[in-house]
Image: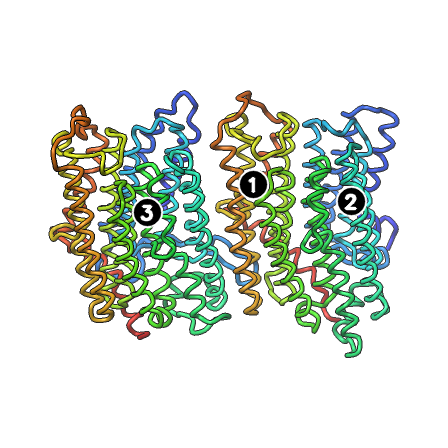
Amino acid sequence: MNWYEQIHHIGPAFALLLGAGIVMTADLIAPRRAPVVALTILVLVAAGVWAIVQAASGIEGPALAGAVVVDRFALFFAFLLIFVALAVVIATSEGLARVQHRPEFFALLLTATGAMVLLAQSNDLIAIFVALETTSIAQFVLAGIARDDRSSEAGIKYLLSGAVAAAVLLYGFAFLFGLSGTTSLEGIAAFVRTGSDGTQLALVLGFVLVAAGLGFKMSIAPFQAWVPDVYEGSPTTVTTFLSVASKAAGFAIALRIFYGGLGGGDTFIAEHWAALIAVLAAASMCFGNAAAILQTNVKRLLAYSSIAQAGNIAVGLAAVAAGSVAGPSAVLFFLGAYAATNVGAFLCVIVVAERIGVEDVSGYAGLMKRSPLVAGVLALCLLSLTGIPPAAGFLAKLYVFNSAVQSGHDWLVWLVVIAVLNSAVSAFYYLRWVRTMVLDEPADEAPFHATAPVQAVLGLAALAVLFFGVIPTPLLDAAQRAAETLIIAPP
Amino acid sequence: MLSVFVFLPAVGALLIATLPRHRTADARWIALFFSTITFIVGIVIFARLDHAAEGYQMVDHFEWIRAGDTGFAVQYVLGVDGLSAPLVLLTGLLGLASVLVSWRIELRVKEYFAWLLLLETAVAGVFTSLDLIQFFFFWELELLPMYMLISIWGSGRPRYSAMKFLLFTMAGSALMLAGFLVLGLQAGTFDIAALTANPPAEALVPLSIVFWLIIAAFLVKLPVFPVHTWLPDAHTDAPTAVSVMLAGVLLKMGGYGILRIVLPILPGEAQDFRVILAAIAAFSVIYGAILTLQQRDLKRLVAYSSVSHMGYVLLGVSAMGAAGLSGAALQMFSHGVITGLLFIVVGVMYDRTHTRQISDLSGLLHQMPLLGLVAIIAGFAALGLPALSGFVAEFAVFAGSLQVHPAATIISVFGVVLAAGYILWAVQRVFTGPADERWSGLGDATEWYELTAMAAMLVFIIGVGVYPRLLTDVVELGIEPIALIVQAAA
């Protein structure tokens, strides 16, 4: 394979990482905000176009000596991550009260996105670790970029807990490599299928450590302790990125390792980690929802809610482990719906924080009168997070829960019962927020608007939430096709 | 046809939502127009039902969601039979009545009518959906309009009541969803007709658990003791029109769900637990009636009486025979119009007197002869006097259940006695007796919208009472196949 074919295989990630460097340099030449933002958007669009070209030209298969692989699964995440990054960049047009003009913000965002795209297509333990660390380090800096106390604290907290998680993950990788003698996921999958009896315990231990390390990225309990503080302290644009992109990347690689690396749901190890993930999912949902009820700060509320939502996705992950055919596509569909929903919700939070300087739920009183668009989109997104039709969140939850039941294990039915009851609990705090916006009298009647680009993104997110809630088939098909490429066929 | 019936109100809601600000008053007329057309479509559906045909009629069907080859497929399928046709008619009637009695709403007019119409769409969807997931979709769609209607336009403690309503319903429906998914996995389809034809003999978890998961949502909605506590709060604090919709059609979703889904798909389990259901029913009848006797607030009185009256529905169901099931279906329809009318009367009265305390009111028949007459007829219908629709329904329920559950039936009959007590007492206190000076300036119900709403309801109450076959023929058409399935499982 030629060098340019190699590059074509990692095209989007290559464009993003190269673009990060260009953005950094461009600021030296023209130190103004507009060209930097324009360039960043250009880079993201270029990466998106490259991904489209990849999809259209139908290239598939491994590259870079097997370290990465191009498949529909990777492309699904490439599109998802680029969409989120684009939304975040546009959100900065609301002004970043706490972040001065910093080109490194955009360069780091591109770096983090590029590494995530690479992560989603990594097919080798070393590539996975390098991509994961690249994106993590970029995000540590992003969390602390505002250079005030809260942001610095968030950055340091994220860095320290992230370092521990990385160490645990690496430890797990060491087990897998030591046992199987290979770093490629295919090799590990082959080893798991044929593995001799004596190695089972060590193999389970290795996978448990990997699950712990990835649990940090996916923000599922009990690896969630960093989430509220980091989400609250980081600039909200960064929080948006963390809660959607970072989590999606975490689930992407978890699917790739556990589903691909384990050779499907029929190996001895599958039932072990199905049970493990099921317990973690239940814990995330119960803890996240219980804690979210007590929150008054919207960013903390959304942080706990995102822990609970991670629990919902993990139900799908457990279904994957338990051998449900619909499991992987359910997780992907949920992530797609969740991305649109959470981007919408966080953008509304950004607008409100920038325009009227409010981060408390009580400050949202009467928002429907002051800014019908922002309040309307936020209300729709909160309904979607609750799982009320016709928003996309309803079908996403339904599909994930269905995939869990479909696995044919009766104990997963009980996990679904826990999950649906948690949805009912979450209605309490999501709808309390909606009620505040619709019902309460505003302290200040002055209307406000988001900037035009942000309005466009809000409209798009709301449209996506409604569209996929009523006509989910396009997204379901995409998720389905992406999931099909995931499983590594037995040799 | 059915799709038109279901989505016409939603179209009206969309239209109202896009009205410019200076034309908000037009929202009333748009809502009236759409709910009237919907009602007419409902009448046409009811009238066009072929009494000789079997199965579902006027079916609209296409595939809604298909997730590749994972076996997850949801259909869009609407259809009516003898069980749902009366409820379709009822939805149209009460949808129109609720728009009429809301004519004087001044607060956020646009939003109000939009939510009201959306609510009608959701309820209509529940009564006509023939796919479990689609059914659930509409079931959940109803939550938000109700929540908004109670919490914005309610009185008293509207936020508390609205949230309580929401959490009770969602907890119930959450369990129902789990049950649906298990059924769907077992049968490979969510189609109600297919599941009815081939009920699963076993499932991932014991079918008895599936039975309780699913029926939990319906018992909450019905509601029966001990999950009824949301109802008095929601009713009392809701605006009149919402009380009308809540009592008239939303509670029927519970009974309908049991008859449409639980009995045909899980007949064996229903038979196993029928004694428990009968016990819950009898207890609800008496408990609801005793609580009703203690109420001082007219609206709470009507609300608690619903708990008692919906107990009859469950009693009829628990008899698991054709007579009892028909009685349950009839009781749903007749309670819908009667209690709807009672809430309208209370609302009209409250508009004039601004009190609902029974102790404050006296001799209103002097000032409001017409309203008093309507209230007395509705009250007599509620206590099951012959020649009014309540009698037909309650008689059928008791006739059906006496053989099967003698004890529960005899206990429940006392509910009728208690009903006579609280209704006659309330009517006597409020309407008869000496005229109170405080109320001497009151006018009768004279507004066209009030009169139209009340007249429409009375036509159905008296019509069904005098000529029950109008309704019973249709109901029996729908109940017969269900009764056959249930009896075969005995």
> Who is closer to the viewer here, B482 or B393?
B393
Looking at the rendered structure, the kind of residue marked 1 is Cys
Q: Which mark is residue A157?
A: 2
The residue lying at 83 percent from left, 59 percent from top is: A170
Q: Which mark is residue A245?
A: none
State which chain disc 3 sits on: B
- The answer to which quarter of the image holds residue A33 is top right
Circle 3 is placed at which residue position?
Answer: B1
Looking at the rendered structure, the kind of residue marked 3 is Met
The residue lying at 56 percent from left, 36 percent from top is: A378
The nearer-to-camera label among 2 and 3 is 2
* Residue B260 vertical placement versus B203 (above, below): above
What is the x, y in percent for residue B203?
A: 48, 71
User: What SS does tag 3 mark?
Assistant: loop
What is the x, y in percent for residue A215?
A: 72, 55
Could you tell me if residue A17 is visible in this image? yes
State which chain disc 2 sits on: A
Marks 2 and 3 share the same chain:
no
